[in-house]
Amino acid sequence: MPQLTNERNKTMVAGATAGVAEALATMPFEVTKNRIQMGHGPPAILLNARDTVAKKGVRGLYFGLQPQLLQVSAKSSLRFVAFETYQRMLP
């Protein structure tokens, strides 16, 4: 049982890490998309991203990152554990 728990913990950490990496990579695109949808800044993607950086700095592209990291890391860790659990059940 301790070995299974250790493997499950490793899987949870791997899932959370993958979720964090995903959020960090996609957050600037999400922020830019949301700004365009709300009518803030120019309607072109690159121009809007440039406008965000000019007004708020690079950190402006990561607005709302903290709650996104909490959500996506928990979701990804559970998804990884579920996948590994069901994979062991299959012949």
Image: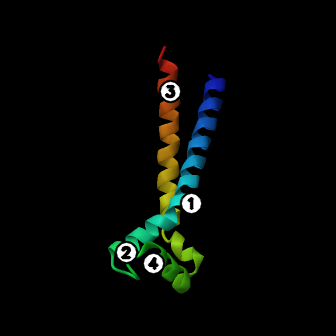
Decide which of tag 2 and tag 3 comes sooner along the chain: 2
Tell me the amino acid under the disc marked 2. Ile
Residue at the spot of label 2:
36
Label 4 environment density (alpha carbons within 10 Å; few <14, some 14–19, many ≥20): some
Residue at the spot of label 4:
48
In front of the other: label 3 or label 4? 4
Residue 46 image offset from top left, x and y in percent = 48, 74
Decide which of tag 1 and tag 2 comes sooner along the chain: 1
* Mark 4 and mark 2 residues within 8 Å of each other at the beta carbon: yes
Residue at the spot of label 3:
85
Distance Cα–Cα, label 1 vs label 2: 20 Å
Residue 49 image offset from top left, x and y in percent = 49, 76
Residue 32 image offset from top left, x and y in percent = 44, 71
Residue at the spot of label 1:
24
**Near-viewer residue (2 or 19):** 19
Q: Secondary structure at mark 3?
A: helix
